Amino acid sequence: MLIYGLQIPKRADVMSPETKEEFRDALRRGGAVAIAAAPFAVLFGAVAVDNGLSIAEATLMSATLYAGASQLVGVELFNHHVAPWLVVLSIFAVNFRHVLYSAAIAPHIRHLTFWEKATSLFLLTDPQFAETERRADRGIRVSYLWLMVLGLSVYVPWLFLTILGAFLGNLIGDPKAIGIDVLLPVYFMGLVLGFRSRANWLPVVLASGAGSILALHFVGSPWHVSLGALAGIIVAALLPLDNAEAPAGDVVEGEA
Amino acid sequence: MENLFHTQTLLIIAAGAIATYLTRVGGYVFITRMKRIPPRAEAALNAVPAAVLTTLVAPAAITGGWDVSLTMAIAFLVGLRLSLLPMLAVCWIVVMVIRHLIV
């Protein structure tokens, strides 16, 4: 079939080879994320019930927030009779990094429709963001199917493991004894290393690392995440621009 | 119903969910309203993955005790060679050996 001189492939079978590749790639990556995050979903369910939430409330929180660290911070505060607005503010502070994520992936998801963006951005987590950037780095167009399969293959296990954790309650015991407390930092370390071929990677990592450790000491959690990230981002903005990577149309240095 | 959900808890969860969703769409809405992204802003956005993810790693590696610090150092070396899942497996074995066989 020819439309405006373009060859449009016939839709004989529903799954084209590219679609199959996308599906498989997203499922494989999502599975790895789900395994790394699994202990934290169970842990969240257990901690939530331990702090007075019902199983239904814990499940609802996983379903609607879908952001592990902020969920744990939130239920910790429930138990301390903190003012409700402060609980919400803490959740917002822990999740503030997503603002940077959605800004950074904007060029990769611009071609999606409004609802495709609205739904896929709901699933935007640390690994979802990192995998999206990596796929775009490899020069592959990020499709809605790929985003949703990746996101849902993490979301669905996250939900079910929250329920499981809520039922198991305190059976889990000390997370340190079974070594699950290191899984998430190790996983994030792997993600950081995955970006090591990018411009100014080392100075950015050093600035963010030092910045977050100093901010944790002098300001406290969860602000160390935003402040540390800010240190790295400022360093990246101030370092000499890599001309090879800058698009040709962006020579507007003297404009302002 | 009274036992399934509590009104105040429900309101906190709803507000927390809305706040979280706003962070997920906020950056996109903000950046796409800019007519032109200056090269330095683009360089800054390009640094977001390493900058943010590092802040989730570094404090844990420093404040978690020597067993966690050692595991993270090994994670760094292993991560240069292996992909994510094998890296997780190796580091989990390392921390379990440290905690149950050495200490």
Image (cartoon, coloured by chain):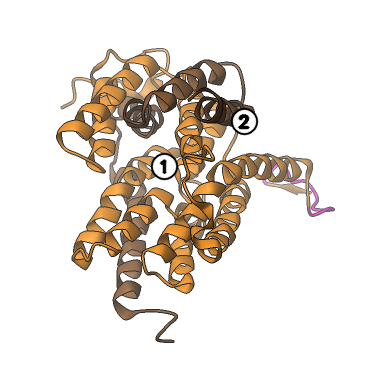
Q: Which mark is residue A106?
A: 1
Vertical placement of A248 versus A40: above or below?
above
Tell me the kind of residue under disc 2: Ala
Vertical placement of B55 versus A85: above or below?
above
Vertical placement of A71 versus A37: above or below?
below
Q: Is residue A120 left or right of residue B6?
A: right
Q: Position of residue A174 (x, y in %)?
A: 46, 46
Residue at image x 59%, y 61%? A160
Q: How many numbered marks have been drawn onto this rendered protein structure? A: 2
Q: Helix, strand or loop at disc 2?
A: helix
Q: Position of residue A204 (x, y in %)?
A: 32, 21
Residue at image x 26%, y 38%? A226
Q: Which span of residues is magenta-colored? A: A4-14
Residue at image x 64%, y 44%? A31
Does A10 lie within the magenta span?
yes
Tell me, what hue is chain B? Answer: brown
Instruction: Identify which residue, A104 or A167, lies in the foreground.
Output: A167
Q: Are discs 2 and 1 less than 8 Å apart at CB?
A: no
Tell me the kind of residue under disc 1: Ala
The answer, for residue A97, to whether it is visible in the render is yes
Q: Is residue A208 left or right of residue B49?
A: left
Q: In the rendered structure, the residue with mark 1 lies on which chain?
A: A
Q: Is residue A131 left or right of residue A95?
A: right
Residue on which the image places disc 2: B89
Instruction: Identify which residue, A150 or A190, lies in the foreground.
Output: A190
Chain letter matching colour orange? A
Does A173 lie within the magenta span?
no
